[in-house]
Image (cartoon, rainbow, N blue to C red):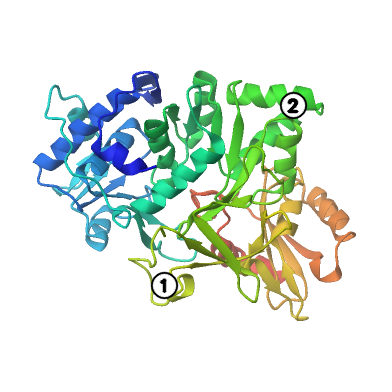
Amino acid sequence: MDVINTIATTANTDTTHRIHFSRDGALQSIPLAELARQATLVAHQLADSGLGRGDRIGVMANNSIEWILLDLAILKLGGVVAGFETGRFEPRAAIERYGLKRLFVDHAAEDDPRILPMDRVREWARGGAAKLLPLHDGYQPDDVCAIKFTSGSTGEPKGLEATVGSIDDSLSAVQEMFHHADGDNILVFLRLALLQQRYWIYSALAFGHDVTIANFESALSMAQLVHPTVIMAVPGFYEDVKRLVEAQSDDPPDRYRAIQAVFGGRIRYLWTGSAPAGKATLDFFNDCGVPLFQGYGLNETCIVAKNYPGANRVGSVGKVLPNKTVRFDAAGIVIVGSRHPVNTRFSWCAPGDNERMFLPTGEVITHDVGYFDDDGYLYILGRVDDIVVLSSGRNVLVRPLEDRLKQCAGVHECVLFGDGKPFLTAVVSPMSAAVDKKDIQSFIDAMNRALLPEQRIGGLVISSERFSMENGLLTSQFKPVRKEIHRRLAAEIDAM
């Protein structure tokens, strides 16, 4: 389906389905038709200020209904939406580096006419009657309509221009798998600066279902209010819920009721991606009768594979989408092709980054190691970067070991190091300051008895601070920033 052009160039008349959101501390909702009308008003205000087709417009703000209105307005304008995570970019530098005509922020403290407050969007959306005609004839599949950024865990975030065709292909494929429809309400609470989080707004407008906008801190309280049927989140979110429910009961029926109670009582399925989900977490939700489907993708590929109802193999990342191809190089590294690539190059990156990621064929080198089983399910073993080479010359894939260690009650997150060393050392982010190192060591000792010699963990470092986005030790997708963790704790690691 031509999803983006449907949103950008046609009037939405859906008064049945709604978008729910919090504004000024209160739950509000409006019909999708009203959302589209207000977005069109904002689009005309952008046009009246001299902006037009192809112009890049940035948004550097926290989740809000104004974020959504601005995103949709820019699509209706025929422009390009650049979503920036707050706190990771300096506004003026972002304008210059990425060629922005305007940048919208939560609070515009700078005296720069190009930087506008999000309150301006709220004012524009309150306008009365206006010429609500389409502002352009539609995008072509290879046209760019968004700019997305990598997490920056390996340096300055790389900027990638995303094509309309890639977004349409992903949304259409997901709809074929999950059949979102009347009665569904998808809860979105990860940062809207991440393009894929905005997909579910587009899905609601194109396919007809409710959608709810929240932020990470308010996700569970919002779920209690709006009773979503679908939640999409990173594995760390579900790991926290798993611990909460496990503390209440060990009976599967009771746990089913507890999970439903946490999420508002109407969950049809849960979905996770962005980072690898541990088998223990996947088994927990599926065994309790609340399906948790794992998928796989990268910024550079969008969605590659998904588990879905009727085709779910726990431990795999699912079957490859029909508009994608997957092959493996001689080392087992996953290489992804697309009917409509997200793009075939970074527009903003360091020298050598493009060659490391993109092949001349337009395919993407994922740097993940994987394989297919006999039924066509894709398995991801870990990143090439997750392979530690010990001083003995032995190669150890550490991610499965990290997943196992995270099952220890006192472990919030962990990373294993050991390149060039005689054994692996675990750096643990503790669940709380009261965690007893002896308990974690006992867990490791029990693990080690079942492992090969080179897999055994010989050193343990407890981080004095819990890994978080705020201290720079987790990415926005809640993945550990290995290089930064090692830099801060290098002395303790070496002392092992």
Percent across and percent down for residue 86 are: 37, 47
- Which mark, by number, is residue 449? none
Placement of 322 over or under 32, stated as above or below:
below
Q: Which residue is mark 1?
A: 354
Q: Quadrant of residue 16?
A: top left
The C terminus lies in quadrant = bottom right
Q: Secondary structure at mark 2?
A: helix
Q: Amino acid at mark 1?
A: Asn
The answer to whether 459 appears left or right of 217 in the picture is right
Label 1 or label 2, whichever lies nearer to me, is 1
Which quadrant: the N terminus?
top left
Residue pictured at 35% horizontal, 55% vertical: 163
Kindly identify the residue that appears in the image at 44 percent across and 76 percent down.
Answer: 355
Query: Which residue is denoted by mark 2 in the rendering?
Result: 255
Amino acid of disc 2: Arg
Could you say which is closer to the camera, residue 406 or residue 43?
Answer: 43
- Say few, some or many: other residues with alpha carbon within 10 Å of mark 1 (under 14 / 14 to 19 / 20 or more): some
**Is residue 319 shown to the viewer in this render?**
yes
Decide if residue 194 is on the left or right side of residue 266.
left
Q: Secondary structure at mark 1?
A: helix
Marks 1 and 2, how far apart in space?
47 Å
| Residue at horizontal 29 percent and vertical 45 percent from the top | 59
User: Which is more toward the observer, 57 or 332?
Assistant: 332
Q: Is residue 168 above or below residue 213?
A: below
Q: Residue at x 71, y 63 (%)?
A: 398
